[in-house]
Image (cartoon, grey):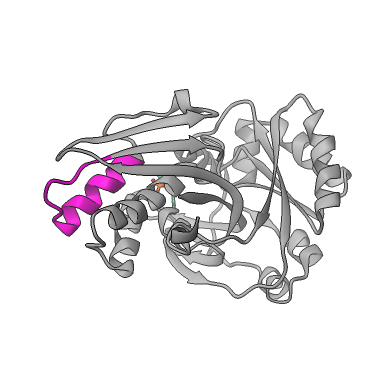
Amino acid sequence: MRVPAKVNLALCVGAADDAGYHELGTVFQALSLCDELVVEPASAGVFRVAFRGEGAAFLPTDDTNLAIRAARLLAHHAGVEDAGCLIVVRKRIPVAGGMAGGSADAAAVLVACNELWGRPATSSELRELAAELGADVPFLLTGGTAIGTGRGDIIEPLETQGTYHWTLALSHTGLSTPAVFREFDRTAEPSKPIIPQALLDALAVGDVAGVGRNLVNDLSDAAISLQPTLSSTLQIGLDAGALGAVVSGSGPTCAFLSDSEESASLVSEALAVFSGVRAVRNACGPVAGAGEDHGSR
Ligand code: C5P
């Protein structure tokens, strides 16, 4: 099955709670840049994951891996006797890129294992387990375009118009999400996270230029302070005609919005020759999440 990456069209960050988690007001969009997973049965108690493709070598494959934790959590929660599985993931979502690749794989494993084991959990139970695994995991089940509140794990799907063409500029090195939040805490004055109404209005009518103008990420300065070259990356994409540019999540991937494939190609060409960019990908959104339509993919 395929599971999409996400970009945050708005990432408004408030204060941290006692556990260190920040209150968020975010708008997610699921993109056609997908990891591909195959999940097969294994003997009781055997839970294994293997990664192929870009960045695979950097990922842990022991019990700390979020995909394994997802399978074990579902087995435990649903009381599946003799549960076990072998998971193979072909990575296309950049590792440590701010596009929720690990969370996407966990969402896909929840859905795939639930199928494998005869659907012991309902959709709403899967959503609860997803939130236990991480703040981004519930959105990756839902996909589309959605508002996330709380830790980003309370999801409200948004009706939007239009197709959004994205160019994604991948960095040479990743950023750790906790490190970016720590930098935010050190440097920013958090206020109540409020998603710009102009962004929601533009999404509702498919005004791609309006969406581009209103992209916002409160973690952007923190990510740029940890990887200063990102500010040049953002400027190069804008100079090449992008309607908007934003650091994706906690970065370092930068996302550029266009209203057509042709404009997105021009943005890609400009970014591809910049030494601060490791690789460029094109994707469009919104697309379905792991919990939607998975039978046909
Ligand atoms: O939930 P997840 O494990 O994906 O979060 C990774 C890290 O991101 C957390 O450990 C925390 O440092 C940070 N985070 C946060 N506030 C949120 C979501 C994530 O501070 N709402």
Residue at the image point whose x is 58% and y is 67% from the top: 194
Relative to residue 209, is residue 57 depicted above or below? above
| Residue found at x 37% / y 28% | 60
| Residue at figure coordinates x 48%, y 40% from the top left | 177
* Total tally of numbered discs in the picture: 0
Give the percent coordinates (x, y) of residue 225: 63, 34
Name the side, left or right, on which 250 lies relative to 164. Answer: left
Q: Nearer the viewer, residue 66 or 202?
A: 66
Tell me what residue is drawn at x 65 percent, y 72 percent.
160
* Residue 18 visible somewhere in the drawing: no
The x, y position of residue 89, in whole percent, is 44, 37
Is residue 136 in sight in this rendering? Answer: yes
Residue 23 percent coordinates (x, y): 45, 59
Range drawn in magenta: 67-85
Q: Is residue 69 magenta?
A: yes
- Magenta highlight: main SS: helix
Camera-nearest residue between 141 and 48: 48
Does residue 38 show up magenta in the picture?
no
Rendered view: 254 above or below 139: above
Asked which quadrant contains residue 239, the reply is: top right
